[in-house]
Image: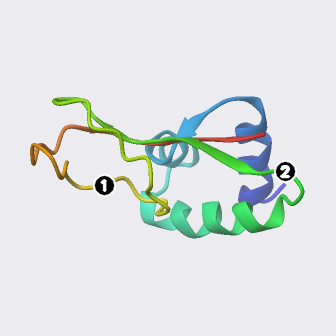
Amino acid sequence: MTRREEIIKLLSEQSFSLQQLANHFKTDVADLTEDIAHVKLSIHPLKLLSDPAFCKKCGYVFQERNKIKTPSKCPRCKSEWIEAQKFKIG
């Protein structure tokens, strides 16, 4: 089973952040960014759902974000204490 197939299997079962997937596969987040983008296109008619990233300090939610990577800092309070978005296939 390829890594992308395993990502699809994992995301079908529960939500994962990029960092959690990187830890599972013992790789860098940057390597998985391409895989997630490919998975997003290849699972049609299913969709890649995501719980948006949010700031742990002020509670700002990154609703309109289309990027896969976690934001570096909050636009409201400038905190770098960001909870990463979590992905799931649904």
Give the quarter of the figure containing the N terminus: bottom right
Of the pair 83 and 34, the residue shown nearer to us: 83
Which mark, by number, is residue 71?
1
- Does the image show residue 37? yes
Q: Residue 87 appears at what percent x and percent y? A: 59, 43
Q: Report which quarter residue 4 is drawn in.
A: bottom right
On the rendered structure, is 55 left or right of 42?
Answer: left
Of the pair 80 and 34, the residue shown nearer to us: 80
Q: Residues within 10 Å of mark 2 (few under 14, many from 20)?
A: few
Question: Which amino acid type is marked by label 1?
Answer: Pro
Identify which residue is drawn at 52% across, 64% down.
33
Of the pair 31 and 16, the residue shown nearer to us: 16
Q: Residue 56 appears at what percent x and percent y? A: 23, 29
SS type, badge 2: loop
Give the quarter of the figure containing the C terminus: top right
Which mark, by number, is residue 46?
2
Could you tell me if the residues under marks 1 and 2 are in contact, i.e. CB atoms within 8 Å? no
Q: Residue 6 appears at what percent x and percent y? A: 76, 48
